[in-house]
Amino acid sequence: MGLLTTTEAQQEYLCTCCLSACSRCTGAYKVQKLDSSNVQEIISGKMSEFQGSASTLFNAKGMNGDYFTEIWSEAAKYFNMVCLPDCTVTYNSLNTTYRTWTYTMAADDPFQPYWSLLNTSGPAVIKDTITNSFTFKAFPTSICPYAASKCVPMPGVEFSEIMQPGGCLEVSELVDGVMAEALESMSADAFQTEFEGLTSFGTLFGEALKTADTFACVAVTCVVIALLYMVLLRFLVGTCVWLALFAVLVLFLFGGGLLIARSSQCQGAELFDTGFQMAVATTTYLASSATNAVNQAVDPNSYEVLSEELLGDGGNGNYTGRNPYLTGASADTKAATIWCFTSDSEVTWQECQPIGVLRPACRNGFAVPDETVRQILEYAAYTSWVIGALYLFLILCFCSRIREAIAINKVAAIFVAGNPTLLLVPLIQAVLAVLWVGSWVFFASFLLSQVPEDYTPSGTFATYAEAYGTATTPGQCTDKWPTGFTYKDDDNCEIVNGTAQCWRCAQPRYAFDYRFAASFFMLLWNNAFNIACGQFIVAGAAAAWFFTPNSEKGRRGSTRQAVWWAVRYHLGSLAFGSFIIAVVAFIRYCLLYLQKQAEAQKNRVMVMILRITRCCLWCLENFLKFINKNAYIQIAINGHNFCTAAKKAFFLILNNALRFGAVALLGSVINFVGYVFIIAATVGLGYLYLLGMHPEALPIFPIISYVVCGYVVSRLTLNVFGLAVSTFQQCFLLCEEEKDKIEGHHDFVPTQMLRILQLKPIENQNTADLDKEFFQWRWLWGLVKMG
């Protein structure tokens, strides 16, 4: 304090140290006032521990014992991460190759003026202490290629490998035992937990490698299961569809019943008991009403007729289960309940519900006490029943369309099961896509890594907010995307107009330019072209198979023929269609790039506009993909160019929207059931294989691999099946449109579609040919005959 000559300077110093009330302070530093008599003893003692042995530094009774635990717990704040060549580098391995670094306070540090004042004008003891006690050894540049200030090792800290290749902080054995355990656990526990996870993962993966032979068997079995699903689909698709439609109707009705029962449930009564009671009351009331409507009176011999003595002459006419009492009787003589005979031999009488009263009387209150909630439940029940009625009406109206969709799916199942080699098409597509994308990423990485030298400012900034920005203002280093990062360079601060500027910008790891844009567009185009070729080959194979006479189906290579059509005649159409998809996708990604730029500029309005625009383009892209798929089918069937095929496909879908909707809805059900069936069967059989071949193996990772295998195979199979369904639907519509022309020459029409097209089988045509072709594999046909 003696070096500060004015009161204002002294108050500023106290404020900087937070030793006095100050608006800049929210607390107080853990500092103590020193004078020149004890500064050398205190400062030199503390600093010598950092430069001395680890046993002294880590001693709880040492000069730094009261602070070091806090420093160690905030290692991420006080330590700098550096990359070392190996874990054998220690403080003692430096020998004579070390560098030295003398501590210099950063120019923008609020204590820097006082530090400089002590260093230049302070007492000789303090100046000597600063010179001698604040110089540290640092790793040489051959080991730590950074500034010397970033390469000063912590005494007592060593590096070792833990379980897997990797490093972790470890405290030297020289450190006091209790302190070492406590401090080491703070750094090692996180690493230990992570590496234990890696070890468990490695063990599971090793178990999977040991059972590779089982996985191969499961993979083959999975393909057989997928084809078996096609077989079952051929015979059971109709039954499954009608059962599913009926189940949905029951769901609406049953759901409404539960809601109405809940709204009428009495306190203490079970929900299903209440529902059953209401159902019985409803049935009884309907039966009684029907009987009365037919007979216009109650049968005199019925047990429901009471004696004339109680009711008077003619009082039993048209009795409907009312509580009987004499006309003019007082309220006290009216019965509160109705007693009925029971079928229980031990209970002759019991209280029963009057006919026509569907809800029980709740003397103890309702299970749902709030009347508003009960009304909501009641209206929800009525809504459910109305929706169920509308659903039933729609089913009755679209029965013919549903039967048509079932027939199309049956034919598609026959086709896929009869052409298993077609499943190789999406598999080859996937392999080509992986190879292409992998090579593209390799070469594109060179384009991305070429960040221009002037991409970020090279100057310095006074504050972090100026460099990085705030929530509403972009920073000088983060005002564009890709965004670099901001760092404080204490060793190279610049003084500009009397202000210390220590914050700098670091370039991002990648940047975009026109070269990457062109490369990225080629990626999108090639991926779309790959998908287009696969869709056309499947559609072409399905179309070739459809128009082949039934007696020859399965004997011609429809897949090879489709590949030849694609290569020889329609590559231009496929390239043009995929080009349109690539353009729309590229524009959408360009908008994403602009959105990221707007986010960097903190422009929330523009970000929202771009998000909405991207959403619209995403919808357009998916619509064009749907049109393209059907255009490729039209190309496969009729051989049109892309524009003509797209136009015909669009108007075909528009004019038959309900038919396409029915097929799409049915396809969703079939796909869901297919995924569940194939994956479940694969996992179940795979587990049995595992028990038989490797009973000692851990089943976790193998079972996961079986699930993945089942999903991949089911996706490949059902994608081919779905495209075949779309192709056969358009073939069916073409046959329907040209019915007059093909009649008499319709020996190619699958037998499942003849009745829907109102065509008769051609004489001397074996209508079972198509079904026999379904079992063209000898092993499967043999199993059928054995059965």
Image: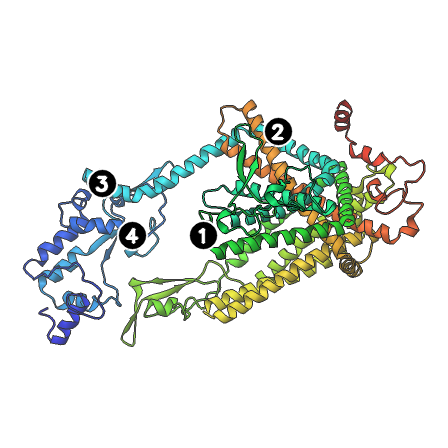
Q: State the residue in front, 626 or 444.
A: 626
Sequence-wise first label, 1 or 2: 2
The N terminus sits in image quarter: bottom left
Residue 268 in percent (x, y) is at 45, 42
Q: Which residue is denoted by mark 3 in the rendering? A: 180
Vertically, is 232 above or below 18? above
The image quarter containing residue 7 is: bottom left
Q: CA distance from mark 3 to mark 2?
A: 53 Å
Q: Nearer the viewer, mark 3 or mark 2?
A: 2
- Name the secondary structure under disc 1: loop
> Which amino acid type is marked by label 4?
Phe
* In-image side of 624 versus 497 (left or right): right
Q: Are marks 3 and 1 in contact (CB under 8 Å)?
A: no
Q: Is residue 626 visible?
A: yes
Q: Which mark is residue 79?
A: 4
Q: Nearer the viewer, mark 1 or mark 2?
A: 1
Q: Which mark is residue 298?
A: none
Q: CA distance from mark 3 to mark 4?
A: 18 Å
Q: Nearer the viewer, mark 3 or mark 4?
A: 3
Q: Which mark is residue 369?
A: 1
Which residue is painted at 57% across and 60% down in the image? 516
Residue 42 in percent (x, y) is at 11, 55
Q: Is residue 514 visible?
A: no
Q: CA distance from mark 3 to mark 1?
A: 64 Å
Q: Are marks 3 and 2 in contact (CB under 8 Å)?
A: no
Other-residue count near label 4 (Cα within 10 Å), few / some / many at <14 / 14–19 / ≥20: some
Sequence-wise first label, 2 or 4: 4
The image quarter containing residue 707 is: top right
